Amino acid sequence: MGPLLDPFIDNEFMQRALLAGGLVAIACAIVGTFVVLRGLAFIGDALAHGVLPGIAGAILLGLPGIGGAVVGAAVMIAGVTVVRRRSRLSGDTAIGLLFVGMLALGVVIVSRSDSFSGDLTSILFGEVLGISWGDVWLQLGAAVAVAAVCAVCARPFLLLAFDREHALAAGFSADLYEWLLLGTVALTVVVSFQTVGTLLVFGMLIAPPATAALAVRRIGAMMAVAAVLGVLSVAVGLLLSYHYDLAAGASIVLVEVAAFFVVLTAQSLRRPAVRPAPA
Amino acid sequence: MSAPAVVCDGLAVGYGGRPVVEGLSLEVAGGATLAVLGTNGSGKSTLVKTIAGLLPPVAGSVRVLGMVPAAAPARVAYLGQAQPSGFVLPLRAVDIVTMGRFAARGLVGRMSREDRRLAREGMARMGVADLAEEALGNLSGGQRQRVHLARALAWRADLLILDEPTAGLDLAGRELLAGALVEERRRGAAVVVCTHDVADALGAEAALLLARRVVGCGPPSQVLTREAVMETFGLVLAELPGGSELVMDPVHRHDHEDGHAHDEPDGGGP
């Protein structure tokens, strides 16, 4: 068990990385399940990248990056809502426009600074091996908040994923819960960027719930499987990174995406078998 | 039930303040059915969405169970026409049907044994009890529509609003639905159903014929005249060389014998 446990036992930075990464994985599993069910993957992606100019701008001004991330996420959500309401364009088009616009703005801001390439890398890919205990606590708070919101709002979130009119007819304000869901996604993205980076938090948001959706059919089970997969991926990714000197955040996401395709392939191979008749 | 299920008075319905249909005055009593007939774009979905509280009325008033629309979600089941079809929801059919109980249980109310029983019963009534554990995405279009109807039945509402519920249903499914709606009315629930099939309207207490305006409203035996039905569906009469007449549908349907109503149920939606 040496090579599997020693890296975590010997190095406090590995413990912090495992804890913070695990908490990101759990928050992402919960909210990501609704993102996958809802088909919001694209907006999750857009949010993850839309925070880039906010973070870059904040760092340029010498402010904490997380404040800029909050502003970036808010602009992204508001922008998507406005374009969707004021034009006949589909949500995809609105999101795509803002996504590209925000990404370009981020790069423009970054290009204004000479010594920014290191910062840009850490924004995009995170610094999972360089986080503090304070970051871990922040991550814990966010994970608890995300879990609480999703537990209370599970029914309207589920109805919105399925049939917006049913949500309204059942007495749930579709706008309110849409905002809450987007806000929860945004919170997850904003808090997680320090750990895995804006580019990779999207992978953590989508890959484990998508893998779980292949295997199970209950929403609670989807979240549980996604959380276990996510935490395992964090551990495996960190170990790969430790032993083979790979980028940690990217290794974690690669493990998650690989798990998805392994399950998908296994299912495709098994599919021709006769399904047991339902009782 | 004291108040009628639906009362419309000088109601105009539409989108963004622009009326699609104006001058709707009607009443649906508990235990009765109102069939809303019209082509696509005739305003029938707009009307039932207004009754369900999904759209604000443009003018006039509408009362549902003696209240403003959407005041009592647990008592008004609504099944819209646009069911998500291509989505990838992996959820089980029984979980979809259980959503019909969300209105009664609210945000965090516990699902009781009774809720689960109503969900199972809804599935049994639509003949899909054996599909409960299947993922909705694995079902055929007609099976999905049955699951959606089971969801509306599980609501156990005092008013059921169903927008083209027979779309995609096979004959057996239609018969199950008709039987289930008879049971719903027997326990006092009112039913408002949109359809473009005249046969569906024959058994209703009242029929409302819409063609972006009110063509007729009243008991089917009185309002389903040949002229009214032809006007509603935009049909035209052509004279054949032999002197007989042929009803032609320039928009969607074809070659029905002329008469007060269709004698045989039509294929319905695809």
Image: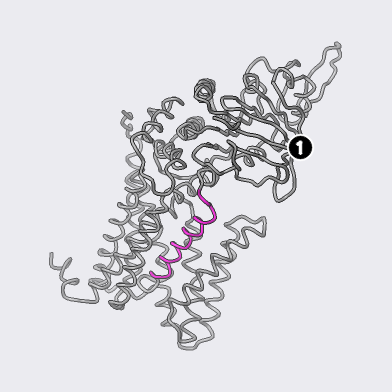
Quarter of the figure that contains the C terminus of chain B: top right
Chain holding disc 1: B
Q: Is residue A176 magenta?
A: yes
Residue drawn 31% across the image and 77% down it: A134
Residue nearer the viewer, A145 or B32: B32
Q: Amino acid at mark 1?
A: Gly
Q: Is residue B158 magenta?
A: no
x, y percentage for residue B182?
53, 21
| Colouring mode (rainbow / by chain / secondary structure / one colour) | one colour
Of all residues shown, which one is farthest toward the front? B2
Residue nearer the viewer, B221 or A42: B221
The magenta stretch spans which residues? A172-192
Residue A107 vertical placement versus B81 (above, below)? below
Mark 1 Cα shell of 10 Å, populated few (<14), some (14-19), many (≥20): some
Residue drawn 85% across the image and 17% down it: B239
Give the image quarter of residue B8: top right
x, y percentage for residue A68?
48, 77
Of all residues shown, which one is farthest toward the left? A1
Residue nearer the viewer, B243 or B77: B77
Q: Main secondary structure of the magenta part?
A: helix
Quarter of the figure that contains the N terminus of chain B: top right
Residue A215 vertical placement versus A83 (above, below)? above
Q: B115 left or right of B226?
A: left
For label 1, the residue is: B23
Q: Secondary structure at mark 1?
A: strand
x, y percentage for residue B91?
40, 42
